[in-house]
Image: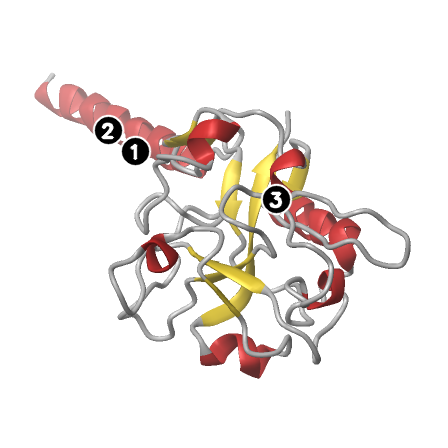
Amino acid sequence: MMRATLRLTLLACAALGAGSAAQAQDRSAMSFFVTSVNAGRAANLGGLEGADRYCQTLATAVGNRRTWRAYLSTQAAGGQPAVNARDRIGNGPWRNANGVVIANSLAELHGTNNLTKQTALNERGAVVNGRGDTPNTHDILTGSRPDGTAFPSGEDMTCRNWTSDNEGTAMLGHSDRSGLRDDEPSRSWNSSHPSRMCHMDGLRSTGGAGLVYCFAID
C-alpha cells in the first residue's frame, strides 16, 4: 500500500512538473518583447514592413501567432509622410513573456510605465543584457522622440528609414533604463541617444546589437 501511494505521489509530482514546464513555455498571452537577435543586416531591417515581419517571425517561433508590429518611427522622405511608432502598436495593454504588464495604454507606455531590465524581456522570456553586462545590448532601435513620434525630416534618426546598414544614424532607447548618468535620456526606454552609424560595429560601440521592441496589436 505504501509503495503504491509513493508511486502515485511521484507520478503526480512528475505531472505537476511537466505542467509547470509547459506553462513556462506558453507565450500565447505575450504582447510585448525585445527581439533576441538582430534581423541580420544591422539597422537595415527592410523598412517597416521588414521589421514587422521580423517581429512576427520571432513571435511565431515561440508559439505566439498574434499580429505584431515593430516599435519604429520613420521620417518624411521621397514624398512619403512620417510614421510615428506610437501609432503602429495598438492600444494595449501589453504583457511580456512572463505575463507581466509593462503598460496598459499608450499614455502609460509613454509616461510612467513598467519597463525595466527585469520586465523588458525577449520573446523567449530572457533578460536583455544591460549596462554592466558583457556584452551590453541595451540600445534598442526606435527612431523616435520620447512621446513616440517621428523626428522631422532633415537629420537622419532612422538609418534612412531602416534601409541602411552603413551611413546614417538612428535614435536608440535603453531597455534597462540605465546609462552613464542619472538623467532622463539615460533612463529613456525609447529616446536616449543616437547611434554611431548604422552598421553593426557602430551599433555595438555604444552598447547595442540592432534589437527592436515588438508589440502585438490584437
Residue visible at 35% across and 43% down in the picture: 119
Residue 178 place in picture, x, y as percent? 30, 59
Q: Observer-nearest residue: 208 or 27?
A: 208
Q: In which quarter of the image is residue 66?
A: top right
- Residue 160 lies left or right of residue 176; in this view the side is right
Q: Are marks 3 and 1 in contact (CB under 8 Å)?
A: no
Q: How crowded is mark 2: few (under 14 residues within 10 Å), some or many (20 or more)?
A: few
Could you tell me which residue is drawn at 67 percent across and 43 percent down? 84
Please give the residue where the numbered disc 3 appears in the rendered image: 149
Whether residue 29 appears in this view of the structure is no
Q: Is residue 13 left or right of residue 139?
A: left
Residue 17's disc is 1
Question: Which amino acid, by three-letter code, is at mark 2?
Answer: Cys
Q: Mark 2 points at which residue?
A: 13
Sequence-earlier tag: 3 or 2: 2
Q: Which residue lies furthest to the left in this view?
A: 2
Q: In this view, does 178 lie above or below 17?
A: below
The answer to which quarter of the image holds residue 192 is: bottom left
**Label 3 vs 1, first from the N-terminus:** 1
Q: Which of 175 and 18 is in front in this view?
A: 175
> Within the image, what quadrant is residue 218 found in?
top right
